[in-house]
Image (cartoon, rainbow, N blue to C red):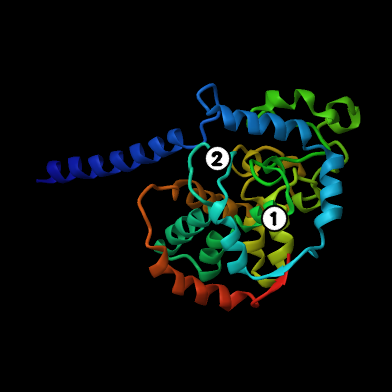
Amino acid sequence: MKKIIFLFVCLVIGSAIGHEETQSHEYRVYDETTPAHVREFYRVNHENQTLDFVLNKKQEYLPPCHIRMGIWDAIKHLDTFVDESDPDLDLPQSYHCYQTAEAIRRDGHPRWMILVGFIHDLGKMLQLFDEPQWAIVGDTFPVGCAFSDKIVFPEFFGNNSDLKKSVLQTKLGIYQEGCGWENVHFSWGHDEYLYQIVKDYLPEEAGYIIRYHSFYPGHHEGEYQYLMNDYDRAMLSWVQLFQKYDLYSKDPEPLDVVALKPYYEELVAEFFPEVFLW
């Protein structure tokens, strides 16, 4: 009997490990098998995300001042948005909001983290201002210093004009070691934009997740640690925890969004006013 139980436990553990390995291999595959439209997205993204471009976008959009609206207005705007940089999901981003939040909710995490799962991609409503997708979505990375070869499709940086500026192609570039990621300029997109909009309404852990959830070279590949400070090291585990839900909640199993909406209406109202500046 003990032998049977032992074999059963091994089978269960092996199955779980196999499932995790399958997940890690099935998602975020960026190689010659990646769809052509995703490769083209990153080619344009890497060519145009320069330090000057990022500084100009920050001046244009920060602090938020373009429009007054609420969380549910932003959710509606995502209904027709399909992320061109995502090789794993061809569904409207509003649906992915529910997927991520529900996965976090099932595991019993705090309400603020469930909310982060629900709103983490709302910065993609930059599309309202006619921004191209390469300036909205995709993995983020520091600009103003050398590009890591762990960034998705690093070969596409070949036409980035920052390569011609020697000071921007050193390890530290314009930064100081240990300066903290908050003092680093990242490629412009929905992460930083949404962070600046919601940071005053949420716990700091929530803001940190939103700000860096697309920074895969940092939280997944361990790059740019020399720019981190003690605060980053203390907070990074939250992003790494969230990343699993953001990535592995992309399940084709349907959700009853109508039935779920009242719960999220209450959750949103707990943290946010009806309208605020975007």
Report the amino acid beneath label 1: Leu
> Is the residue marked by circle 1 packed among few (<14), some (14-19), or many (20+) residues within 10 Å?
few
Q: Quadrant of the C terminus?
A: bottom right
The answer to whether any part of residue 151 appears in the image is: no
When asked about the image quadrant of residue 259, the answer is bottom left
Where is residue 24? Give x, y as percent: 45, 37
Circle 2: element type: loop
Q: Residue at x 85, y 29 (%)?
A: 161
Describe residue 211's horizontal placement relative to residue 27 as left or right.
right
Residue located beneath label 2 in the image: 86
| Amino acid at circle 2 | Asp
Residue 128's tag is 1
Mark 2 nearby-residue class (10 Å; few <14, some 14–19, many ≥20) = some
Q: Is residue 263 left or right of residue 43?
A: left
The number of numbered badges drawn on the structure is 2
Q: Is residue 146 visible?
A: yes
